[in-house]
Image (tube, rainbow, N blue to C red):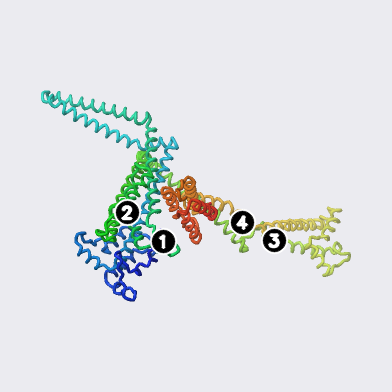
Amino acid sequence: MSLVRRLDAYLDRLPVLSQGSSDDGVSDVDEHGFAVADTFAGPRLDHLLRVVQSLSTTSSSQPLLSAQRVRALLIQSGIPTVEHPSEGDGSARAAYADAKSAYENEMEWLLVTKATIQVYGVILNALLDRIIPLSDGIWYWSEILNSYTYSSLYTVQTSPLRLWAWTQDVYVTSKTRMRSVSMRDAPTELVDSTATGTSQKWRQFYGIVRDSIRERSFANIQCKVLSPVAFCRSEARRKRAQLGKLREITASGLGVLMDEGLQLGHDDDKAEVHDHQDLKGVVERSVALMDVVLKEVCTLDVSTDDFEDKVFAGVEEDPELSVHLEDSVTPDRPAVLARRLLRIIDRTLPEHFNTMQSLAQANGRPPRIVRYWLPAVVGLFSSTTVLRILVNRKADIINWITDFGVTVRDFWFNWVVEPTQKVIKTIRHDETSEIAIMSRDSLKADRESLERMVVEFAIHKPHFAVDGASISEAQIAEIRSKVAEGDVTPVLRAYEKARKSPFVGAVRGDLVRTLLIQVHKSKVDLEVAMTGIDSLLKSQELVFGFVGLTPGVLVSICIFQYLRSTFGGRSGQHQDRTAGRAIRILRNIDRILSEARPTENNVLSYKDHGLLLCEVHVLRSLTGKLMPRDVGKEFLEDLDDLANMKGIQVQAKALDRIRWAYARWLK
């Protein structure tokens, strides 16, 4: 806790050893005004120094020691075992005062004060740990009261307990009546026979039980207002009120300790050193305040105002305060405080814990066995039927599981893995992955074949290609280039001439030859068109690959997200739940500040301050889950401003600053 850390740091800044004055005003200095060095030497002071160092805060993450550790260090110091001489023995008191140096006395005070700070932190943590779970119980009873369905369910859940209580009442009533009847009819039994006496006893027993049941039933009807649900709602309302009262009293005690305990000036930045006697008085009153608060905080039959008055009256009238003792009989004050701290650790704190736990259990939500006995019974009786079904359908269940596994595997490999591999091959320009609707060299071979056929035809029939009777190489090259562009004019000329005399052309072969060349030309044209389509498909191959991969990926992502959300493993949802809880805490803080009735100093009352500290404590624990480390430090500073008693207006401004400055992490 930061408060314990600040208090401990404040004590470390005090010039304890430089003040050579004891309680009786004697200074251990030489004629030049310097402290005597011999007073620092000795095993006693060394031992006290080691214990003081053990009681000091050395870690910012864990500034608090456990109560048992503080107890062990106090016993190790030997201060609680110091026995002060009796008030009548003046010489013994003088010898005792001379034996203890001023430095040893100051060191004992420092040790006891540090132990007080640690116990103070332990008590504050204990109150916080006890008050925070009470809100869950209050919320549970509110849910019961706000829904008739939940009220009926609670009635069913607690019916065995009410039946058991009713049976015990009937048994106790019948036993009491039987005892009174037996005592009244004892002289008559001596005269009656054995058989007659036995039958008469049984008739009396049945009559007594019947009357007891009738009386208890009539009493239950009156108590339950003719409805078990109404009685349970009344019980829930009563328990919620008890938890609310316990929460308010505990919050008031927490506020009293925070506002009135250990006010050592640790917030004073002007390095103003208080008088040692004032500090010792503050420590004494703080120990008394802790003792009284722990004893009175579990009292539920008083209001918060009466509780506060009772606490302050108990501190003022505390018989162990030195102001109530005469100077001549003042005991060794560090030893008295050390023994009282041990008493708080050994007795008061455990008693407070047990009382708070018993009150919380008596008025909190029922145990798990009460809330879930009905599903447990149903599950127990239906377990044999379920087991029989599982055994009879064992083969079918195994087949279902196997088929489901095969389906999942095939879906994963056929619709996710293989399309992904194809996309990767396409990105890498793998030739085996290219889309093709015709062979790679088919068009080239057909074009060359067409060129050869047209050139041969032109050589054999040059008058169709050129005007002369022969053809040159240049003309052949020109014809070849035109054929590559799709121009087969010599063949078409021959076809036109042969078509005029088809029978003669067929006999001579020119018509058939030109027809075959044109058929081959049509095949080449078709292949050119298919090549264009093929090129278009290749240019969009990556798109087609992603289109084939998209369904499998989308289905896989949806299933994965559903499973993560179902089993609560997604960090985003956890972050949202944490942020939602932080927003609800801020809402509770705003409600506390809005509904608070400030005191004359314009600060919160002890109860409101205690409730505010509980909410801030929970919000502080969520800091590491909400925001980064550097932002968390600033957030904790603003939480300190919100929790400190600097006025309601200052706290309201701190709350507004938290809302707008950290809205990004509180969405």
Q: Which residue is mark 2?
A: 288
Identify the residue under disc 3: 442
Residue 434 % position (x, y): 64, 60
**Residue 57 in the image: x percent, y percent?**
37, 63
Query: Helix, strand or loop at disc 1?
Result: helix
Callout 1: 10 Å neighbours few (<14), some, many (20+)? some
Q: CA distance from mark 3 to mark 1?
A: 89 Å
Tell me the CA gap for discs 2 and 1.
21 Å
Q: Specify whether 236 is left or right of 102.
A: right
Q: First in sequence: mark 2 or mark 1?
A: 1
Look at discs 3 and 2 and give the one toward the viewer: 2
Front label number (4 vs 2): 2
In space, the residues marked 1 and 4 are separated at their CA atoms by: 65 Å
Pointer 3 local density, CA inside 10 Å: few below 14, some 14–19, many at least 20:
few
Give whichever of discs 4 and 2 has the lower sequence position: 2
Residue carrying label 4: 545
